[in-house]
Amino acid sequence: MSNGRIPDSIIEAVLKHHDIVDVVGKFVHLSKQGRYMKGLCPFHSEKSPSFTVTPEKQIFYCYGCHMGGNAINFVKEMEGLSYGEAVRQMAEEANISIGWETPTEQQTELQLDKAKLLQAYELSTKLYHHVLLNTVQGKEAMQYLRMRGLTDKWIEFFQIGYAPPAWDTLAQFLEKRQFLLPLMEQGGLLSARSSGGYVDKFRDRILFPICDVKGRVIAFGGRAMGDVQPKYMNSPESVLFNKSSSLYNFHQARAVIRKNRQVVLFEGYVDVIKAWEAGVTNGVATMGTALTEEHAAHLKRNADEVVVCYDGDNAGQTAAFKSIATLEKAQLHVKIAMLPEGLDPDEYIGKHGAESFQREVIESAVPTIKYKLIFERKRFNLLQQDGKRQYLDVAIRMIAELPSAIDREQYSKELSVDYQLTLDTIKQEMNEHRQEFLKKQQTGDNKHHSWNNDMNIGRVSKKDAPLLEAHQVAEKKLLSAMIHDSEIATYVQQRLDEQFNVEAHAALAAYLYAYYAQGNAPDASRYIATLQDEQLESVASSILMLEGNEANNAQAIDDYIRVILHYPQLQALEQRSQEALRAQNAGDYALAAQIHKEISTLKQQLKSF
């Protein structure tokens, strides 16, 4: 059985070399609990561990978000890779020869286009970098960068380039190397002329290469040096580049981010570069777009804390304020770096130096509640009694909603001192607001996942857990037995084939029959590798987490099959019973009697099965 262009032998070798505990352990702190390893899920926010790794089966499964699979699936999801890219990366790490690299007839057009565009971006980066460093055209851009405090070392390190003013420098460069110009337009390197032909997308701009998680250039961020509008221009969306999920410099900062579990979020490319030079090597930036939930989720997979370090002017601080809700929704601990005098990070470093930036800005970043109070205070005229009263009402409401009693006490005291009010007065108003706030909240602290709620004492009550119908339980247990025993699978294929009532279960059975038909031995991880479908991988992983199904006697297997085959008949029986009731209520007693006879026949058939 093949997986697209990837030979089964490669997948088998990759899974054999990479123990899933080691793979997952690079991202998740795992603790041993009996036969399992458990930790906090890296794919969604949770307070108590529901993410489970089974070493003997080489699979993982999360009982919260239902993500599951083998080591390849885990790397695929964590790194944001395609299945083939994940296999390729893991094969390279294991020094396993990857024989499917050469494009074949089976390789999709999209894959070929991506490969060509990656090659074009790599060459374009080198061209623009060369123009900046070695040509007369690049002198003004070099002077501008040096004026901004960037040394040759960091210009080289970040591969900064310059697009000359000519209309078709890159177009000619790519055409000579036999790149298809329509594809280059689709990839964001060129623009089509209305009169025909192609021109460069970027002209007379300093270019900052934007890379994917593997360090491959996928787009450019362009900055004009004069009064040209727009001042900043990014590559358009393409098959390589998605602004809503890409982060500048993430590929270089990732190791430090994961080690420290902290990321510093900047607004601009130069801010990231200057901060790196100042020793802040866990900095990233968005692509000139507002922070998205995709960005936040991406950060959450790698860090626990975000320090937002936006410009000190009104626009930057407003953006920082707006970012808080998005980041906290992703369950990130957020702090805001305070930049004085309306400076941006680049300017602050130039004026006060690297040590001051680290100590006074990054390390002194304030909690979000303190920042919100400072931000809101600017909206009111505190010299007037009405303005002061309005601000106090807003501030007390904000403090009342804090989950920590210690924090509520601390900030109440600060308000008391700052505005010469008694602590009792503030607490009285705050308690009223807090009661109002609590009434609006649902029970529990994790509304979206009540099963994983600290207020549920970390476990699921029986009434919370959805009860499966008998045929669903039978199908799951039967599939579990089949995955662990090829003889059981053969027996079930003869008796039941694909007559599973749940569509996903029928698909899993079909894949399993094909898996064994290829002569494969029972192996949960290898079987999952054949599915190539996220939903089926999740369902298979959940089935494999069932307890006590690996040893099944013949009677149990027959019972499972009987329950599965009975279900359609039970449904038909229920339907006819409803029809008989409707006929009786309508006064059609003859029809009701006829249906009851059919019901009796159906019941006899069930008994004789």
Image (cartoon, helix red, strand yellow):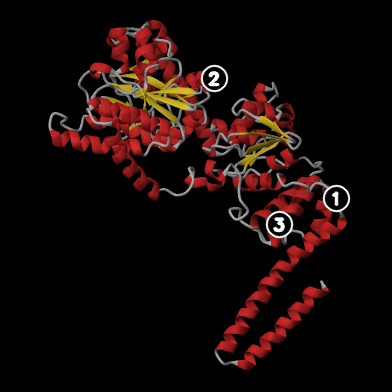
Asked which quadrant contains residue 345, the reply is top left
Residue 189, x across and y down, in percent: 39, 28
Image point (30%, 26%), residue name: 414
- Mark 3 lies on a secondary structure that is helix
Amino acid of disc 3: Val
The quarter of the displayed image where residue 316 is located:
top left
Q: Is residue 465 left or right of residue 401?
A: right
Q: In the image shown, does 474 or 121 lie closer to the viewer?
A: 474
* Label annotation for residue 526: none
Mark closer to the chain start, 1 or 3: 3
555 horizontally vs 580: left or right: right
- Give the residue displayed 66% in from the left and 71% down from the top: 571
Specify the amino acid type for callout 2. Answer: Lys
Report the side of 148 relative to 40 (left or right): left
Query: Is 406 drawn above or below residue 596 in the view shown?
Result: above
Kindly report the distance in space between the C-alpha atoms of the residues bearing marks 3 and 2: 42 Å
Position in image of residue 368 (x %, y %): 36, 29
Residue extending farthest to the right is: 554
For this rendering, which residue is in front, 281 or 491?
281
Residue on which disc 1 sits? 487
Label placed on residue 259: 2
At numbered mark 2, what does the secondary structure look like: helix, strand or loop?
Answer: helix
Quote the CA–CA distance across marks 1 and 2. 47 Å
Q: Position of residue 528 (x, y in %)?
A: 69, 42
Q: Nearer the viewer, residue 281 or 288?
A: 281
Taking 1 as reference, is 412 left or right? left
Q: Secondary structure at mark 1?
A: helix
Residue under the image location 60 percent in, 56 percent down: 463
In 3D space, how far apart are the residues under numbered discs 1 and 3 (Cα atoms)? Answer: 21 Å
Camera-side mark, 1 or 2 = 2
- Residue carrying label 3: 473
- Image quadrant occupied by the C terminus: bottom right
